[in-house]
Image: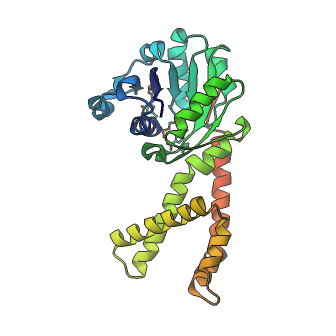
């Protein structure tokens, strides 16, 4: 892998900003000294400073020297942040926004038409190189799109999508981590009811979920193909599965994902 040579500023180093920083280091995309992390209260970044990351509360200072700027604050915190950095941005500077519900055009409206804006929607598994990241832009240059795809490919899988699907990607992939985690927790709770200690039930549920995901990834098969191999006629799997469906298992996931997507599209207020 060809490491990135420039400097990266991650503005808003909370859950996803820190996960991204850790993932990029783990993947050898950059060295800690190439990555500046900002946050309102930087004492929360002491451990990362000790690992060699540049830590600062001064967004404008780090943007003024950055080749790539990652916007990783909450949607409701974005306008104030953009006002802070507006005086120091450089023409054609590359901005990667992971902020949900904010378009490339929204960001250019605040920073000016010369900046390059690409949106990325990773998930927290980026910290261990297992993100599903969707990337979209309206008018960024192809070489910048390639660099952003390369960056996120070092920390998981990447799909380039149309920008109008970014809120859907937020629900399915970024929120999706939480949905699958809750499913694993529920399975482990079921495991406790049928006789296992909580720790062993969780371990069994986690490995079983991992096996299910890996089956699909490695066999390139459809979930129902794999389900058909488990459901013996008159057996216990189909009995359990149908009971779950009678109680709305698939329907509940579908409805939750639809609601998340609608909410993701309404998180940002332009003014
Ligand atoms: N958490 C997740 O799994 C994902 C989150 N996102 C998006 O990433 C963004 C951040 O989400 P989280 O990391 O979960 O939120 P968070 O609340 O953990 O992190 C945001 C950070 O920004 C800092 N911040 C706020 N204003 C600032 C400013 N002016 N200057 C510097 N730092 C500032 C806050 O102190 C906080 O540490 C959101 O827009 C969210 O929609 C996208 C994909 C996944
Ligand atoms: O819950 C949220 O709003 C953010 C966006 C995607 C994941 N977390």
Q: Locate residue 227, reporting x and y percent.
A: 63, 74
Figure quadrant of residue 269: top right
Q: Residue furthest front?
A: 1
- Above or below: residue 88 compared with residue 199: above
Side of 48 where 122 appears, left or right: right
Observer able to see residue 20: yes
Name the quarter where the C terminus is drawn.
Answer: top right
- Between 203 and 182, the one lying in front of the other is 203
Q: Where is residue 111 in the image (x, y as percent from the top left)?
A: 61, 16
Q: Residue at x 62, y 71 (%)?
A: 226
> Where on the picture, by quarter, is residue 57?
top left
Q: Which residue is drawn at 61% across and 84% down?
A: 239
Q: Where is residue 192 in the image (x, y as percent from the top left)?
A: 40, 76
The answer to whether residue 99 is above or below residue 178 is above
Confirm whether residue 98 shows in the render.
no
Q: Which residue is drawn at 56% across and 49% down?
A: 175
Residue lying furthest left? 50
Q: Residue 206: x and y, percent?
A: 44, 65
Q: Is residue 162 left or right of residue 34?
A: right
């Amino acid at each position: 892998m060809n490491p990135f040579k420039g400097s990266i500023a991650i503005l808003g180093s909370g859950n996803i900003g820190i996960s991204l920083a850790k993932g990029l280091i783990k993947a050898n995309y950059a060295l800690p000294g190439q990555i500046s992390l900002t946050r309102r209260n930087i004492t929360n970044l002491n451990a990362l400073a000790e690992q060699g990351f540049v830590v600062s509360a001064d967004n404008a200072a780090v943007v003024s020297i950055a080749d790539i700027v990652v916007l990783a604050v909450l949607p409701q915190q974005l306008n104030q942040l953009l006002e802070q950095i507006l005086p120091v941005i450089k023409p054609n500077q590359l901005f990667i926004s992971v902020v949900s519900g904010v378009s490339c055009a929204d960001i250019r409206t605040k920073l000016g038409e010369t900046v390059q804006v690409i949106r990325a929607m990773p998930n927290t598994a980026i910290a261990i190189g297992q993100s599903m990241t969707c990337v979209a832009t309206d008018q960024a240059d192809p070489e910048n799109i390639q660099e952003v795809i390369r960056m996120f490919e070092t920390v998981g899988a990447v799909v380039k999508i149309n920008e109008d699907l970014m809120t859907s990607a937020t629900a399915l992939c970024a929120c999706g981590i939480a949905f699958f985690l809750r499913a694993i927790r529920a399975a482990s709770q079921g495991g406790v009811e049928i006789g296992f200690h909580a720790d062993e039930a969780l371990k069994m549920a986690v490995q079983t979920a991992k096996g299910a995901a890996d089956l699909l990834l490695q066999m390139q098969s459809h979930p129902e193909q794999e389900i058909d191999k488990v459901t013996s006629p008159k057996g216990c799997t189909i009995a359990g599965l149908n009971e779950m469906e009678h109680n709305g298992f698939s329907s509940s996931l579908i409805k939750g994902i639809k609601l998340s997507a609608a909410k993701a599209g309404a998180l940002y207020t332009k003014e």
